[in-house]
Structures are given as C-alpha cells and as structure tokens.
Amino acid sequence: MRKAIQSLVILGSLLVGSAAYAQDTAEIQKAVDGLSDVFAKDVALRWKWKGDFRVRNENIEQEFSADRNRSRVRVRLGFEAEVNPTVKAGFQFATTENGDARSSNQTLGDVNSRKALDLDLAYVEWAPNAATKVTLGKMKQPLVTTTSYFVDKDVNPEGAALAFNHAATGGFVNVAVFDLAERSAAVDSTALAWQAGMRGKLNDDTSYVLAVGEMNHHAVKNMAVVQSGSAGGFFGNTTKTVGCNSTVALNASCLANEFEVRNALAEVTTVFADQPVVLFVDWAENTKAAKLNKALAYGVTLGKASLPNSWEVGVVSQSVEKDALYGQWIDSDFAAGNTDGDGYTLRGAYQVAKNWKLNVAYHLNQTNNDVPATVVINNKNALLMNRDYKRLQLDLNYAF
C-alpha cells in the first residue's frame, strides 16, 4: 500500500512538472513568434524589393554588312534598405554580356549556356533634409536627361553625387565626380559634372524642365579609357597611335581629344486632344575638340502607356558629330552605338495589362557622316560615307 501511495505521489509530481514545462514552453514560443512578427514587419517597412524582365527580338541591317536577327533577355533584381531615417542603401543585379556598361541585355544562344548576372547598382544615399541628397557608389544617373540618345539609360556611373532641389522655386543643382579609370602607374581618369536648372508650371496642363551643365573629363586624351574585354571600344571618337601615354600598349590606339562637354536641354509636358504630350530639345558641344564637336537632338511623344490599354508614340531626331560626346556614355542602339551618326527613331508603346508593356523602336540612321568606314564591295575594300543603319526592336516588359 505504501509503495502504491509513493508511486501516485511521484506520478503527480511529474504531471505537475510537465504542465509547468508545457506552459513555460508555450510562453517561450509565443515570445519567439512575437519577435518574429516584429522583425518581419520591420523588414517589410525598411526593405523595398523590385525587379523587371524584358524579352526582345532585334533585327539589324547595316549597309554592306550581313543582316542580324537575335533574341535577347534582360533581368534586373534589386532592393533598397533603410539604414536610418536619413540613410538608405541600394543594390541591383542585372544580366550582362562581358560586363558591358551600356547594355544589360543577354543574347540567347550559345547552346543553352548559363547567363551571367552582375552587380548593376551598389550605392548609399544620405538625405539630411528634404532638399539635399548625397549618393556614393555605383548609382543611377544623377543628372537630368531627356529622351535623346546622348546618354545610355543602362549606364550606371561610379563615384559621388550631390543633388539640391529647392521645392519653393523649382530650382535644382546637381554636382558629381565619376571614376572612369584607376591606374597605379599614371594619373587616374575622372569626370567632373555640374548641372543647374529649373522645374515649373505654366498652367494646370503645362510644365517644363530647363537645365544647363558641363561634364569635364580629365586625363582621357592620350589614354585608352575604354571598357576591358569585348565590351570595350572607342565608339566613334577620334583616335591615334602616336603620342599615346606609356600605359597604352605599343601601336595601340588612344583618344585624340579631351572632352569638356557643355549641355543645354529643355522639356515641356502639356496636353493635346486629351493626351499628354512631351516635347524636348537637347544640345551639346565639346569645347576641347577643334572640330566635329556638336550634337543636337529633339523629339516629341504623344500619349503615355501607363494604365491598361493606354498607349504612346514618339519620334526622336538626333545628330552627333564624331567628337561631340564622350563615346562611353552614348546610347548603344542609335547609329550602331557610335558617335558620327544621325537619323530618326520611331517609338511606340502599349500597356497590355498592369506591369506588362509592349514597346517598339525603329532606328533609321546613317553612320560615318564625318569619317568614312572601310567596307568590302565586290571583294574590294572601299571607303563609305553616310552608311545606312536600321535597327528594329520589339520588347515585352514585365515589372514586379
């Protein structure tokens, strides 16, 4: 009988202990779940994820060259994270071919090989007040641009930028220092840019942007300041093989000019026939080149492809002389991605559904307006001026 009572006492103690343990475990789990919820909400508030995917079919016809048709994809994945109320950091990865700064497209083919995904953006941004912003790292283009092809929208500069915007007057100032080439045996190549302008409204339907600026490239003359590998090239700028810096390989080419490019632009947004209209003009001159140093672009866009079933159409006219712009910045599609070209681009877009857009662009250009290209005609080398160049692009764009 005594043993039975002892057994019941021990069993009761175990049951009481188990109940207390279970209660403690439940409370611990509840606390952990609470912390997880707080952390998840904090991350959701401080982190913003974004991405887009584009499928492109492209047809290229260049006079006295074989036609080319290719399918390409572009993937961009990134996020911004709040460090504190005045500081945020941003990162983005994008498809690439040989690290090309002017294109994040990847051509399909190569027998189903893996496609590269490289660092596209890596920056920190400090905004001490509503008017001022400082950005460091590999950043989005900090200067105001138009829909001209003076600057490729895929180029993400590297360096430091300061932006000041005065809300009351609409005035703004941008200053930036870009790193172009770092060298241990010679001076580094850099670019110092400034821009000042004004945003304003003429009435409820009409607004405008005006800006002037300059980008002074330092230590690019006599240097081969180009991307490494197959993505590199001078992209139309005048080169030479005599008088190059000692860092340039023997008998290799280097740039013949410095680039101090002055720029003025204007853009007006208004309404016509109940549709938004955007008109722009963009002008540039390289004061460090004695000739072939001017560029001009202008165009118009009617409509805006944003809501489902909305559309837009536009046209751009552009002419860029051989040394008007630094070739590493210019658009990679217009005039074969080189200076020394002119022509038109017809553009259109249709918003199929939310976050799904169809785009088309048809470049009708001429290259080698200033300096002839060497081509093969009837099995003989010949010099050709004003070479026809056509490029048709059909895109499906998906944002998420």
Image (tube, rainbow, N blue to C red):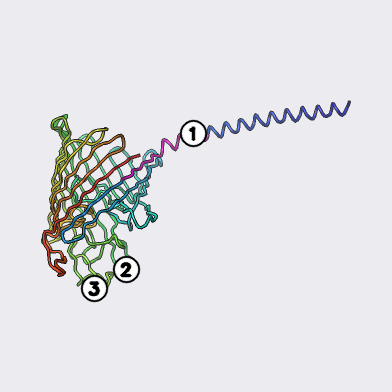
Residue drawn 53% across the image and 32% down it: 34
Task: Locate residue 17, reporting x and y percent.
Answer: 72, 30
Image quadrant for the N terminus?
top right
Element at badge 1? Answer: helix
Q: Amino acid at mark 2?
A: Ala
By secondary structure, the bulk of the magenta-drawn segment is best described as helix
Element at badge 2? Answer: loop
Element at badge 3? Answer: loop
Which residue bears the numbered disc 1? 38
User: Splitting the image into 4 quarters, where does residue 256 fall?
Assistant: bottom left
Residue 56 visible in the snapshot: yes
Which residue bears the numbered disc 2? 185
Q: Which residues are magenta?
A: 35-54
Q: Is residue 49 magenta?
A: yes
- Is there a contact, CB below 8 Å, between mark 2 and mark 1? no
Q: Amino acid at mark 1?
A: Val
| Residue 112 vs residue 86, the one in the foreground | 112
Task: Locate residue 146, reporting x and y percent.
Answer: 19, 45
Which residue bears the numbered disc 3? 251
- In primary-sequence order, the first of circles 2 and 1 is 1
Residue drawn 56% across the image and 35% down it: 32
Q: Is residue 207 left or right of residue 224?
A: left
**Disc 2/disc 1 C-alpha distance (Å):** 53 Å
**Disc 3/disc 1 C-alpha distance (Å):** 64 Å
Q: Amino acid at mark 3?
A: Asn
Task: Locate residue 108, reporting x and y percent.
Answer: 33, 53
- Packing grade of label 2 (10 A; few <14, some 14-19, many >=20) is few
Task: Locate residue 324, reporting x and y percent.
Answer: 15, 57
